[in-house]
Image (cartoon, helix red, strand yellow):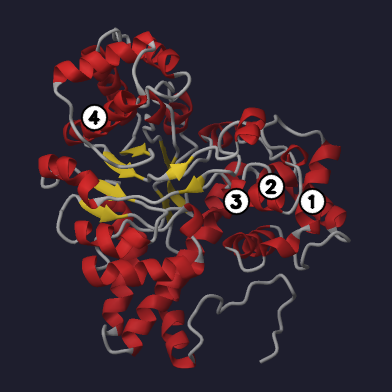
Amino acid sequence: MPRSTSPLQPHPDRLFPADPGVRAIARRLYEAVRELPIISPHGHVDPRLLLTDEPFRDPASLLVTPDHYVTRMLHASGVPLAELGVGRGPLPEPEARVAWRHLCANWAAFRGTPVRYWFDAELSEIFGITERPDAGNADRLYDQIAEQLTQDKFRPRALFQQFGIEVLATTDDPCDDLSAHRALADDPSWSARVIPTFRPDRYLEPAQAGWRDAVTRLGEVSGVDTGTYVGFLCALEARRRHFVEHGATSADHSHLDVRAEPLPADEAQRIYAAALAGTATAAEATAFRRNMLFEMARMSTEDGLVMTLHPAVHRNHHTPTYERFGADTGHDIPVQVEFTQALQPMLTAFGTHPGFRLVLFTLDETVFSREIAPLAGFYPSVYAGAPWWFLDAPDAIRRYRRAVTETAGFSRTSGFIDDTRAFCSIPARHDMSRRLDSGVLAELVAEHRLDEDEALETAVALVADNPRKAFKL
């Protein structure tokens, strides 16, 4: 059937099953969740963006430079990261325009990727762009978006409201004073929840460069002497309380593995002292990190912060790029991971604790059905985290639902996680998830495995109830 829409206008039935009967069911389910508020319990938007509400500078700094999904693929196509503004401050207008031209000239590189899906939605639904970007129209599209960014309705707060975001969680260093969060919470003109997330990774890894300086800073900010292991634990506990007081509901962790093995107190103190002295071995540093992951779980049972784990990433895979541009610049690469044995000590101690909640994410799809779903299908504390990062794509999300649901059901999953620094992609990402889940549920209805009223309740729960329950919102 010929399309009546223009080349960039997303099709109203996008991502729904191709079978006409199943597609009709998916449409009905989707309509029930399409306008529900967005709950974003894990992401990387800077809260100061909303506090200051300053206009976005230009199309490139909004849509290209902060999004490593975009910059990594342009780099793979031969575009230097420096020309995209990666690792730099705000680009002057001529350089921002160059970065935008690179995106448009390499538009074909994104075919078949979720990035293309998100871009189609962002450009058409937010900025009214109705033609596919290319080298020939790059400057014209840049000017069209740049003019809109000068208008009040395209400022951060106005877009936040337009997107229908109810809760937005940020990711924050334990030493952050969280003043931006406090100011937003105290602002009578601001009603949405923007909450911090405790992210202590660099404080738990003695082998990483800068660890001792980080520990010293932790002591200064917490007011607790971190010269001993016991003091170090107390300092982390104090900062966690600070985050809870500022609205945090979760603590986020990402290490090479998820093994959590407690050490005897004297051994933990010995390794901690050696790490401070710079003499800890690599094996000792790993043992200490695994001990600290166990301690983070113990602290979660006491202060109530949900523990989220997204392990198994080789960070900064290309050393020259890291040395020039820093972390989070598109070259973090997944590795294999094991959960069942690694988490047994933690779950033996805390898996049935009424105050403990653990959300497990992975970039290794093989563990969804083999390990994560069975764990979530037994332990009341465990939830199967949504596909994220390289897996937040249509086919991967469908595979996740089919891998997890038969073992753990829908109720033991976390709800969608957008995990983004790209502010304008948030509604497109959540809409994609809602469409895909509507399609999966529609297939179950068509196969007479669910009644449609059950599918409708489940579709709403995945958007509105699951993330609130999993993240204690």
Q: Which dot marks residue 291?
A: 4
Q: Rate crowding at label 3 as few (under 14), some (14 to 19) or many (20 or more) other CA atoms within 10 Å.
A: many
Q: Secondary structure at mark 2?
A: loop
> On the image, numbered disc 3 is attached to which residue?
69
The mark closer to the camera, 4 or 2, is 4
Task: Write down the quadrant of residue 346 in the picture.
Answer: top left
Q: Which dot marks residue 102?
A: 1
Residue 357 visible, this angle = no
Q: Which dot marks residue 29?
A: none
> On the image, numbered disc 2 is attached to which residue?
64
Dot 3 amino acid type: Tyr
Do labels 2 and 1 touch, CB within 8 Å?
Answer: yes
Sequence-first disc among 2 and 1: 2
Q: Is residue 68 left or right of residue 400?
A: right
Q: Secondary structure at mark 4?
A: helix
Dot 4 amino acid type: Asn
Q: Could you tell me which residue is drawn at 76 percent across and 42 percent down?
A: 80
